Image: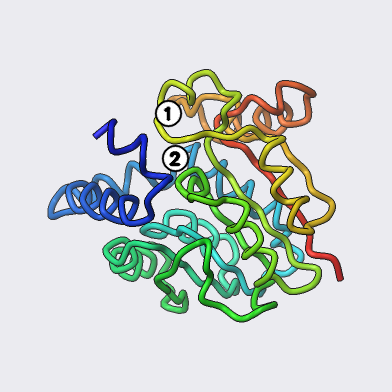
Amino acid sequence: MMKDLKTLYQDPQAVKSYWENSTEARLAGEERQRFVSQQLYNFIWRTTVDAFIERAELKRQPDAHLLDVGCGWGRVIVGLKQHLPTLRVVGMDLTERLLHLAEDIVPSETGMNDVRFVRGNAQYLPFADASFDAVISTRVLQYVQDPVAAVAEFHRVLRPGGRAVVFLPNKWNPYLRLKYHTKLYSPLEVKGWFEAVGLRRVRAASIRLVPGWRRVGAHIMLPIEKALQRVPVINYTGGLVAVQGLKEV
């Protein structure tokens, strides 16, 4: 498996095959609910959802039209819809099996059936220009053969004044460099992608700066996480690169 992971970012078909096979094993039969329960409602999940809401400024436009690129089985979408029920969300992924799971899991966890799911490639988004108020993506661009092309597509489908926000594993985090076998990027590298395609007011930092200890409540850990995000140097070393940018009006 490690050999396959090293080449995933070079081959979209390999990415699709890997996630189809691994997801089938993890989300089959009785194992499914246990897996979903472990992945949702913990500190790490809440940190990610809160960071997307803050960085995309979704509270200012709770009925925004949002695209989640590489949505998988809908983990982030569940949190977004629970916080902002009127948010209009499209989830896109390369893997059909994940999308079928999302079509089941998201309504069951949120009680809402208004999320649309579409199959597509991050480098060739199947949407018209200026279709969305926000585009988000988490832990996807490290698998994309040309991440700059993907970010250019995010810029294209954004409406003027819209925001793109991406999270991906951080090359400057020592633990992540050991864990991941795909190519990793730093906050400043990802910031360069955003600036290269014309996004403005680009901000680069990281999230996941504190451990997700189960015995310590999120109400204690979240303020620490947000405080560390404001500390120079340290704010670049979290588990996930966090970069956001604005499409000019």
Q: Is residue 196 above or below residue 221?
A: below
| Percent position of residue 215, x then y | 44, 25
Amino acid type, residue under disc 1 in the picture: Arg
Tell me if 213 is positioned left or right of 102 in this view: right
Amino acid type, residue under disc 2 in the picture: Asn
Location of mark 2 (residue) = 42
In this rendered view, identify the residue nearer to me: 122 or 63: 122
Location of mark 1 (residue) = 214
Tell me if 179 is positioned left or right of 241 in this view: left
| Percent position of residue 28, x then y | 16, 54
Quadrant of the rendering where the N terminus is positioned: top left
Callout 1 secondary element: loop
Name the residue at 61% across, 50% down: 166
C-alpha gap between disc 1 and disc 2: 8 Å
User: Mark 1 or 2 closer to N-term?
Assistant: 2
Q: Hey, which residue is sitting farthest top in the picture?
A: 174
